[in-house]
Structure formats: structure tokens, C-alpha cells
Amino acid sequence: MVNFLTVVGLVLLLAGGAAATGWARAWRRRQGDDRVDWENMLADCKNLKSQGVLSEDEYRKIKTLVEGRRSSS
């Protein structure tokens, strides 16, 4: 009886570990995607500045905010 419970306990432990690993990987991927989105947004703003839609001052403010956001992510 003890052997059966030990095996069941180990199986549950392994299943829980696998689930936790899957969750952690998904979380890390989401964090990586967030950084890419900030970089893309900054590139879009740079294009808007070159087209004259944003002023240099507006672009600089946005860039400061985005760089602060990327470093804290």
C-alpha cells in the first residue's frame, strides 16, 4: 500500500512540476513579447517624427518613457 501511495505522490509531484514549468515558460514569452512591442512602438514614433507628425520634443518624451518602461520590464 505504501508503494502505491508513493508512486501516486511522485506522479502528482511530476505533473505539478510540468505544469509549473509550462506556466513559467508562457510567462517568460509574454514578457519577451512586451519588450518587442515597446521597441516597435518606438520605431513607429520615430517614423512619425521623420514625417513631421511628432515634434522632436514629443518624440524625446515618448522615447524617455519607453526606455524607462523597457528597463523596468
Image (cartoon, grey):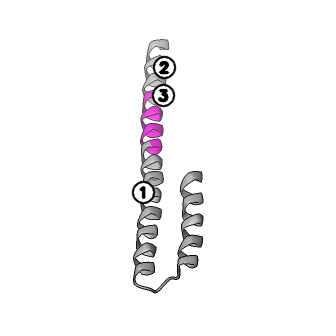
Q: Which mark is residue 13?
A: 3
Q: Amino acid at mark 1?
A: Asp
Identify whether 31 is placed above or below 19: below
Q: Which region of the structure is painted magenta?
A: 14-24
User: Is 56 or 43 nearer to us in this picture?
Assistant: 56
Q: Position of residue 2 (x, y in %)?
A: 49, 13
Q: Residues within 10 Å of mark 2 (few under 14, many from 20)?
A: few
Q: Which mark is residue 5?
A: 2
Image quarter for residue 21? top left
Q: Is residue 67 left or right of residue 52?
A: right
Give me the residue at 42% from left, 50% from top. Answer: 29
Give me the residue at 59% from left, 65% from top. Answer: 65
Q: Residues within 10 Å of mark 3 (few under 14, many from 20)?
A: few
Q: Which mark is residue 61?
A: none
Where is mark 1, residue-wise? 33
Query: Does the magenta stretch mainly form a helix, a strand or a loop?
Result: helix
CA gap between label 2 and label 1 equals 42 Å
CA gap between label 3 and label 1 equals 30 Å
